[in-house]
Image: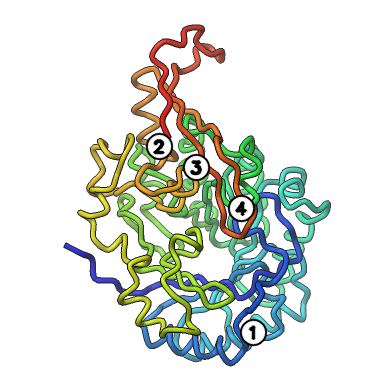
Amino acid sequence: MATSPSLVHVVWELTLKCDLACKHCGSRAGKPRAAELTTAECLDVVAQLAELGAKEVSLIGGEAYLREDWDVIAAAIVDAGMVCTMVSGGRSWDRERAIRALAAGVASVSVSIDGMARAHDEQRGLLGSFASAVASMRTLREAGVEVTANSQLNKRSVPDLDAMLDLFVDRGVTGWQVAMTVPMGRAAERPEWLLQPHDLLELFPKLAELATRARAAGVHVFPGNNVGYFGPHEDTLRGVTFSGTGFEHFEGCVAGVSLLGVEADGAIKGCPSLPTGAYTGGNVRERPIRAIWDAAAELAFARDPRAMTSELWGFCGGCYYASVCRGGCSWTAHVFFGRRGNNPYCHHRALEHAKAGLRERLVQIERAPGVPFDHGRFEVVVERAQVDGAPEASRDGISRRP
C-alpha cells in the first residue's frame, strides 16, 4: 500500500554560487546556475510550498547569502507560517548579514564544520576557512541567531570528532547533524577520502558515545538519512532529534514522502541530494509544485514500501530488515552503484560480515563526468577480514559485485 505523502521539510538551493570550492561538494558549487529563479519566482515558490503544507524550509547553496534577496525570501517563508533555517559554509557571516537573518526570522543557521583546522581547510580547499567558519558561529550567536552545525563523516573528519564536539559545546551550538560523505560531485574524484563499510564498526560506537556526551552538554547529535542502520546504537542516535522527538529506528527513505528538494533553476526533486538527471520530476516554471508533487514518478518511488522493497538487490535484497529499511538512503546507493536498492553504508551489514570473518571494500570502476550532482560507479569487493591489522594471505572465496 502506497504511503500518502505529507510534505514536511523542503531543502531549497537558492543559488549554486559559492564563495568556497569544497573538494567534497556534491553539487560542484561555485558558479551560479545559468537561469536561476528571479525574486518574483522565488516568492511564488514560497506561496506554493505554504499551500502544500510544508512545515520547514532550509535554504542552502552554493551559499544562500550570496543572493542579494536571500533575506527577502527567508522573511516571506516565515510570514507564510513556515520555519526558515539556513545551511552555510560559514566563510563570510559578518554582523550585517547576521542581523538580516535575525530580522527575517531565520530560526537557526547550520554551519558546516568537517574536522578541525587542518582537515577542514584541506576539504574546503582554502587555508583559513575553518577559522572563518568558527568566527561566523560567533558572529551569528552574538547577533541572537541560534547556531547549529553539520559535518560530513569521512577519513579526514572522523579523527577529529571528539575535538569537534568540544568546539561546539564551547561555541554554544545546540544541534549537530552528521552525514556520510558519498561519491557525488567533487567527492567522487577523491575515493580515498571515503569511509569503507568496515570502518563503520568503529565509527558507530564512537557516534553513540559522542551523542551521549553531547546530550549531557545540551547539544543534540542527530544522524542524516545515510547514517545507519539497525545496529546496537540505533536508538541512541535516532531516539532523540533536535526537536526533542525521534524514532526507535530508521523507517525508510523519505524522498517525495515528507521531503522535497528545490534547485536554484526551479527543478523539483524528492530529495535535494539525489542526482538531478534521474530524479527531477519537473520544473516550477513549467508546472505547479503541487502537480509535480502529486504526479511525478521521479518523486513517488519511495511512497510504495512493497514496490521499493521489491527492487532491493545485493545484501539489502536478503536482509532481515528489508521491509522496514528498504535499502536505507536511496541517494547513497545510487551514487555508488548507479541505482538505488543496495546501501553499503549500513552498520548491521558491516556487523553481519564481521561475524562471518568478512568485510566489504568499495572500489571505483567508473569516474564521474564532472557536472553538478554527478557520480561515478563503484563495485563491492567482499574479502576476508583483517587479522591483527594485516590482510589475510588467502584470497579464497573473494567475490566482486557491482
Q: Earlier in the sequence, mark 1 or mark 3?
A: 1
Rounded to the nearest angstrom, the CA distance separating label 1 from label 2 is 40 Å
Q: Where does label 2 land, which residue?
A: 347
> Residue 163 placed where, x, y %?
66, 44
- Quick one: SS at disc 2? helix
Tell me what residue is drawn at x 36 percent, y 53 percent.
Answer: 239
Tag nearer the camera, 2 or 3: 2
Tag nearer the camera, 2 or 4: 4
User: Looking at the image, is 232 positioned above or below residue 90?
Assistant: above
Tag nearer the camera, 1 or 3: 1
Out of 242 and 270, give the one closest to the viewer. 270
Q: Which mark is residue 185?
A: 4
Q: Where does label 1 land, which residue?
A: 71
- Amino acid type assigned to the residue bearing label 4 in the image: Gly
Q: How many marks?
A: 4
Q: Where does label 3 land, which residue?
A: 207
Q: Earlier in the sequence, mark 4 or mark 1?
A: 1
User: Looking at the image, is 219 positioned above or below residue 356?
Assistant: below
- Amino acid type assigned to the residue bearing label 1 in the image: Asp
Tell me what residue is drawn at x 50 percent, y 51 percent.
Answer: 216
